[in-house]
C-alpha cells in the first residue's frame, strides 16, 4: 500500500501537472514492486503479449472521474514496459460515460482502445457468486488478460465509499441491483467472481481531488485537493485506507461518520474476501462460483419456483387499490441507452437504470426502455393551517373589503 502525494500536483484552478503525476506514479509502482526502476516495475505487471485493461470510473463526467492525465501516464509507462498500444484497453460501463469524462471513445484495434461495455457487450451466461448473479463484460472476460483498476477516491451516498472494490461494479450488467444494504455483501461478492480475482493485478486510486460527501456525483463543494494517488495490490487494504481518509475529512468538516449514517465499509465480515492479493488465485475451483458448474437443468430447477411465484403475484387479481395510472406519465430529462437502459438526468445522481428498475429516489421507473414518473401530480405534502399564521396575516384588512 502506497500513498504518494505532491502538494504542487495541481495549482488552484489549473490542470494536473503531468510530469509531477508521472513522478508520483513511478514512485508508487516502483515501491510496490520493489524494482530498480519504474520501467522494471511496470514490466512485472504485465507481459508484452498480454492485453491490459484499465478499468476507469467515469460516472462523474469531467468533474470527478479517473483523471485522463493519470490514464495517459499509465498508458505511457505500459508502452515503455513493452506492452504495445494495441494491447491497451481503457474501459468502463458506457461509451457515453467515457466520452463525458474526456476519453476519446474508439474501438479501433490499431491504437489504444477506449470502449464501454455497452459497445463491447456482455457474456450471455450468468456468473454467480453468493448473492450476486450477473453478466460480465466481455472486455473483462475475453479481451483482457490483466486489469489495472483505476477508481476515484470518493464518498458514495449508498455504499459509503467507492474505490477499488466498488469500481468493479462496472464489470457487470446490473450494478443497480446491488446498491441496497450499503452494498453488503454485494460489493464483496462481485469481487469474488473469478475473472475479477484472477485478472485485477493492481489498483491505482485517483486521489487528486477526492470527495468526502455527496458522491458518487460530482459535488465540487465537497471535494478537496489531496493531490495524490493510492496504489496497492490489495483492494481491501486500499479501500480501508481510503475510507479512513474520507472519515478523517468528514470529521474535520463536522460531518457525521459514514457508520453513523449507515454507510459503512463495503466489505462484509461474513465474506471470505479479506485480502485478495493473499487469496488463492485459482478461484475457478470455488464451488460457490457457479457459472461453470451450473448446467441448464440445474438453472431451471433453481429458477423456476421463484419465477412461477413472481408470475403468480404479477397475474393475481388486482387489489381494489387506487388507480395509479393518473400519476404515471413519461418522464422528462432522461436519455435512452442501449439494451433498454436509461440515464436519468433529473438530478445530479444521474442514475443509469436497467429495464424494470427504478432510480435511487424510487419515483421513476424504466419500463421497456421508456422512463416514467410514477408520481406526476401527486400531492407530496398537505396539512391544515390557519391563514392567520401565514405571511398573509393582515392581508388586505382594510374596511374597503367590507360591504
Ligand atoms: S432516478 Fe431519481 S435519484 Fe436517480 S437521477 Fe433520476 S431523479 Fe435523481
Image (cartoon, rainbow, N blue to C red):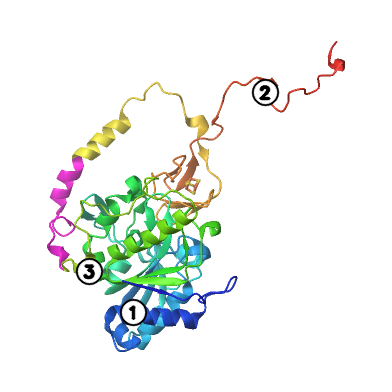
Above or below for 372 versus 212: above
**For this rendering, which residue is in front, 36 or 383?**
36
**For this rendering, which residue is in front, 121 or 182?**
182
Q: Earlier in the sequence, mark 3 or mark 2?
A: 3
Q: Which residue is identified by label 3? A: 277
Mark 1 near ligand 1 (CB under 8 Å)? no
Q: Is residue 144 visible?
A: no
Q: 10 Å neighbourhood of mark 2: few (<14), some, or many (≥20)?
A: few
Residue 285 lies within the magenta run: yes
- Percent x, y of residue 35: 28, 86
How far apart are labels 1 and 3 at the CA level?
16 Å
The answer to whether 395 appears left or right of 28 in the picture is right
- Residues tagged 1 and 3 counted as in contact (Cβ below 8 A): no
**For this rendering, which residue is in front, 287 or 117?**
287
Mark 3 near ligand 1 (CB under 8 Å)? no
Q: Residue at x 15, y 44 (%)?
A: 301
- Percent x, y of residue 233: 28, 71
Any mark on residue 389, and which?
2
Q: Which residue is identified by label 1? A: 29
How many numbered discs, if any? 3
How far apart are labels 2 and 1 at the CA level?
66 Å
- Percent x, y of residue 111: 41, 81
- The magenta span reads 282-304
- Residues tagged 3 and 2 counted as in contact (Cβ below 8 A): no
Q: Earlier in the sequence, mark 2 or mark 1?
A: 1
Q: Earlier in the sequence, mark 1 or mark 3?
A: 1
Above or below for 19 versus 266: below
Amino acid at each position: 500500500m502506497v500513498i504518494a502525494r505532491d502538494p504542487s500536483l495541481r495549482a488552484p484552478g489549473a490542470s494536473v501537472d503531468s510530469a509531477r503525476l508521472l513522478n508520483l506514479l513511478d514512485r508508487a509502482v516502483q515501491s510496490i514492486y520493489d524494482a530498480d526502476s519504474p520501467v522494471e516495475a511496470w514490466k512485472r505487471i504485465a507481459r508484452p503479449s498480454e492485453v491490459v485493461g484499465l478499468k476507469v470510473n467515469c460516472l462523474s463526467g469531467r468533474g470527478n472521474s479517473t483523471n485522463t492525465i493519470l490514464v495517459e501516464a499509465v498508458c505511457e509507462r505500459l508502452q515503455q514496459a513493452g506492452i504495445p498500444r494495441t494491447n491497451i484497453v481503457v474501459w468502463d460501463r458506457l461509451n457515453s460515460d467515457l466520452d463525458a469524462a474526456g476519453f476519446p471513445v474508439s474501438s479501433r484495434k490499431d491504437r489504444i482502445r477506449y470502449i464501454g461495455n455497452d459497445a463491447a457487450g456482455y457474456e450471455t451466461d450468468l456468473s454467480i457468486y453468493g448473492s450476486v448473479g450477473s453478466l460480465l463484460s466481455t472486455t473483462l472476460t475475453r479481451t483482457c488478460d490483466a486489469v489495472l483498476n483505476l477508481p476515484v477516491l470518493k464518498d458514495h451516498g449508498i455504499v459509503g465509499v467507492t474505490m477499488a472494490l466498488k469500481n468493479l461494479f462496472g464489470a457487470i450488467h446490473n450494478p443497480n441491483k446491488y446498491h441496497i444494504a450499503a452494498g453488503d455483501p454485494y460489493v464483496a461478492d462481485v469481487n469474488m467472481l473469478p475473472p475479477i480475482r484472477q485478472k485485477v493485478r493492481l489498483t491505482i486510486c485517483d486521489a487528486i481531488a477526492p470527495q468526502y460527501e455527496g458522491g458518487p456525483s460530482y459535488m465540487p463543494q465537497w471535494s478537496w485537493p489531496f493531490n495524490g494517488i493510492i496504489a496497492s495490490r490489495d483492494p481491501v487494504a486500499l479501500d480501508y485506507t481510503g475510507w479512513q481518509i474520507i472519515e478523517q475529512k468528514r470529521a474535520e468538516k463536522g460531518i457525521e461518520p459514514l457508520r453513523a449514517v449507515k454507510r459503512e465499509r463495503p466489505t462484509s465480515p461474513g465474506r471470505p474476501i479479506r485480502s485478495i492479493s493473499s487469496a488463492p488465485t485459482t478461484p475457478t475451483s470455488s464451488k460457490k462460483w457457479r457459472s461453470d458448474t451450473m448446467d441448464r437443468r440445474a438453472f431451471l430447477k433453481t429458477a423456476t419456483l421463484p419465477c412461477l411465484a413472481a408470475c403468480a403475484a404479477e397475474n393475481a387479481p388486482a387489489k381494489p387499490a387506487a388507480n395509479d395510472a393518473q400519476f404515471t406519465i413519461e418522464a422528462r430529462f432522461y436519455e435512452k441507452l442501449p439494451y433498454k437502459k436509461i440515464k436519468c438526468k433529473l438530478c445530479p445522481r444521474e442514475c443509469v437504470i436497467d429495464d424494470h428498475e427504478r432510480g435511487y429516489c424510487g419515483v421513476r421507473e424504466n419500463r421497456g426502455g421508456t422512463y416514467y414518473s410514477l408520481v406526476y401530480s401527486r400531492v407530496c405534502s398537505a396539512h391544515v393551517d390557519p391563514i392567520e399564521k401565514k405571511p398573509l396575516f393582515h392581508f388586505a384588512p382594510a374596511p374597503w373589503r367590507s360591504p
